[in-house]
Amino acid sequence: MGAIKVHEFTTVDGVVDTPLWTVDYGFPEDLSVSIGALTASSSGILLGRTTFGMFAPAWSTRTVEEDPGAPFFNETRKYVVSSTLSDPEAVWSNSTVLGGYDADRIRALKDEVDGDLYVSGSATLVRAMLADGLVDELHLYVYPLAVGTGIRLFPDGAVRTPLSLLGAESLSNGVAHLTYGPAPAAG
């Protein structure tokens, strides 16, 4: 049984919306190494429908010469949480639909996959998995920027979600990589 490791690019004000603002900060080697460590242990990619729809055209034709991450994204089995997507394989190879969100199905998938499950973006899915205690590691790459508006991982009115800090690293482009896990049970 592997772990579910979530990767989010976020602003200091918590926006995880389509992170076009990351371009201004580049993609230095230490950021690549940090994300590569997450993908290296992963045998599957778990995505929500919206993120799958954005990733498929961006990654499906990308080669290793264009991006060293391309083999991971293209060759790794992708599991899409969606009640509306019918044929993901036609859009992006090695893709399958799990159906609508079902915490028990994701728990079973976690047991079935030999290795970790990597999640990127997919804010709606991640919120549900956090609420159901399914996220083992939450990797927040916090950019030194506030944008004021956009989709937040923890929007106003969200359920209280205690976490435990597992690690913190400062990257060369000013980004803070914060790793959180589930908070220890009170008692």
Image (tube, rainbow, N blue to C red):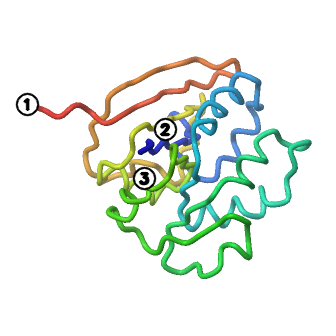
Q: Residue 156 in the image: x percent, y percent?
A: 35, 52
Q: Residue 110 in the image: x percent, y percent?
A: 42, 52
Q: Residue furthest right?
A: 65
Label 3 Cα crowd, 10 Å radius (few <14 / some 14-19 / many 20+): some
- In this rendering, which labeled residue sits more in front, label 2 or label 1? 1
- Write down the residue under mark 2: 13
Mark number for residue 110? 3
Q: Residue 180 in the image: x percent, y percent?
A: 40, 31
Element type where label 1 sits in the image? loop
Element type where label 3 sits in the image? helix
- Write down the residue under mark 1: 187
**Left or right position of 57 against 161:** right
Q: Earlier in the sequence, mark 1 or mark 3?
A: 3
Q: Earlier in the sequence, mark 2 or mark 1?
A: 2
**Left or right position of 71 against 100:** right
Label 1 Cα crowd, 10 Å radius (few <14 / some 14-19 / many 20+): few
